[in-house]
Amino acid sequence: MQPAALLACIATLTAAVPCAPATGRNGSALCISLTVKAGQITPADFTFAPSAAYKPTAGSAFFQLAQTEIAKLANPCNPLLAQGAKPAPAFCQADTNWPAYTTQFLALAATLERSDQASNILSEAGVFRPLVIAYHHTPLLFSAVNAEAGILTFRLPDPLDPRTNTTFQIELRGTPNDDTRNRRTVQIRQNLNPLRGQVFCHSRIRARLQAFYKKLKIPVDIVQLDPQGPLLIIQEKR
């Protein structure tokens, strides 16, 4: 993998955060411990557990991407207090470690009789939900949140390999016949081959696909570009 290519798609490596790679495809894992700065969720530490697809040194670049995404998350106090007139407690704007923050957060929820909602806010269904679609513009595949320990886990897709249907499935819709579809599929694989071995970056893949179809003067919709498949579905429009 080329570090420059990874950064274009967009700390020091440490083993402080429990983390282990998974078996099979997309097995590399990035595990991040959380703290709170000025009431905002902030990454504190990370461990990168790569599969054979990546070198350990790639962890810092992936962590930078995760930091950017996590910085976009809402202050957890905001949805909890949205329906109440009570001013936000001091801890909602303070610097604190994650266990202390969650203790105060859940205590506040209990006084508002919203304990169930508080647990949802601290789960994937709440403030962390935007990370579920982070893969649309980063290689990060949000995997899990351990709200008690304050640890987020991302998986990373294996580097792009567009050569065959086994490594990158391509489905074309709207082509006039099978011969055209088969020929176009071969052309798309050739078009994407310069990205082979690089991190799965949506914007770079889309740019090459759109440039390819622009030359053909055929409008298309990229219906799905899923690194977990990995799968590409294109709808040609005539």
Image (cartoon, grey):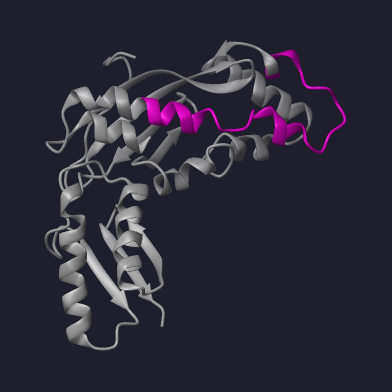
- Position of residue 15 measured from the top left corner of the image (x, y, whole percent): 26, 16
Q: Is residue 42 above or below residue 210?
A: above
Answer whether residue 235 is magenta in the image: no
Q: Which residue is the extreme one toward the bottom?
A: 177
Number of labels in the image equals 0
Q: Is residue 106 left or right of residue 73?
A: right
Q: Identify which residue is drawn at 31% across, 39% down.
A: 155
Q: Is residue 221 visible?
A: yes
- Position of residue 127 measured from the top left corner of the image (x, y, whole percent): 58, 37
Answer whether residue 70 is magenta in the image: yes
Q: Is residue 183 left or right of residue 91?
A: left
Q: Quadrant of the N terminus?
A: top left
Q: Is residue 122 above or below residue 212?
A: above
Q: Is residue 168 above or below residue 172?
A: above
Q: Identify which residue is drawn at 41% across, 83% down.
A: 238
Q: Identify which residue is drawn at 27% across, 46% down.
A: 200
- Position of residue 146 measured from the top left corner of the image (x, y, whole percent): 44, 31
Q: Is residue 25 above or below residue 211?
A: above
Q: Is residue 216 left or right of residue 183?
A: right
> Residue 232 or 87: which is nearer the viewer?
232
Q: Identify which residue is drawn at 21% across, 74% down.
A: 184
Determine which quarter of the picture holds residue 6.
top left
- Position of residue 126 measured from the top left corner of the image (x, y, whole percent): 59, 40
Magenta region: which residues? 64-92
Q: Which residue is the extreme one toward the right?
A: 85
Q: Is residue 18 visible?
A: no
